Image (cartoon, grey):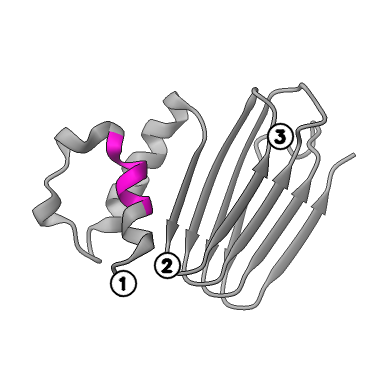
Amino acid sequence: MFKPGWGAFTLFAAACLQAQQIDWDKISSDTVLNLLVKQQTEQQVFGSSVIQLGDHNNAELSVNARTNIVVQQFGDYNSLYFINSFTDKETKTAATAQGNNNIIDITGSNSVSDGMQISVKGDNKTIFMRNY
C-alpha cells in the first residue's frame, strides 16, 4: 500500500523532469511502480537517481563525478551507504531495497563491481560489500 508522506515528495522530486507528461490524477499504488520503471529508464540517460518510497529511509552517497548510481528504497527504515569518492574511475551501479529495516553498505568500486545490481527483498537484511 502506498503511504503518502515524504516518500510521495521524493517521488515528485524524482519525476520533476517529466512532470508535464504525467497525469497525476492517475497515479496510485497500482501505477506508481510503472512510473518508477519509466523514471529509471530515463535516468540512465541523465545520470544518477535516488527514489525512496516509505518513511525514515536514508541514502548517504560519497561519489566521484563519474559515478552513475540508481538507488531505490521501498519500505521503511532502509539505509544505503555508498562510498567511491577516492577513485576517479567511471562506475555504474544499481541498488534496490524492498522491505523494512534493510542496510546496504558499499565501499569502493572496481572492475568486478562495475555494472553490479544489488536487490534486497525482505526485512532486516544487511549487505556489506568492500571493493579494493
According to the image, label 1 marks what residue?
3
- Identify which residue, 76 or 131, lies in the foreground: 76
Q: Gap between marks 1 and 2, in whole Å?
A: 7 Å
- Amino acid type, residue under disc 1 in the picture: Lys
117 over 127 or under it: above or below: above
Residue drawn at (67%, 73%) of the image: 125
Mark 1 / mark 2, whichever is N-terminal: 1
- Asked if labels 2 and 1 touch by Cβ distance under 8 angstroms, the answer is yes
Residue 117 visible in rendering: no
According to the image, label 2 marks what residue?
54
Instruction: Please state the horizontal and vertical placement of residue 53, each as a whole percent of the image.
Output: 40, 61
Mark 3 / mark 2, whichever is N-terminal: 2
- Amino acid type, residue under disc 3 in the picture: Asp
77 over 61 or under it: above or below: below
Mark 3 / mark 1, whichever is N-terminal: 1
The secondary structure that dominates the magenta segment is: helix
**Can you tell which mark lies on residue 114?**
3
Q: In the displayed structure, does residue 69 sit left or right of residue 81?
A: left
Task: Classify the position of the C terminus by image quarter.
Answer: top right
- Write the start and end of the magenta stretch as one range: 10-16
**In the current view of this chain or complex, which residue is farthest to the bottom?**
123
Q: Secondary structure at mark 2?
A: loop
Instruction: Please state the horizontal and vertical placement of residue 119, each as a whole percent of the image.
Output: 59, 58
Q: Secondary structure at mark 1?
A: loop
For mark 1, does the 10 Å Cα neighbourhood hold few (<14), some (14 to 19), or many (20 or more) residues? few
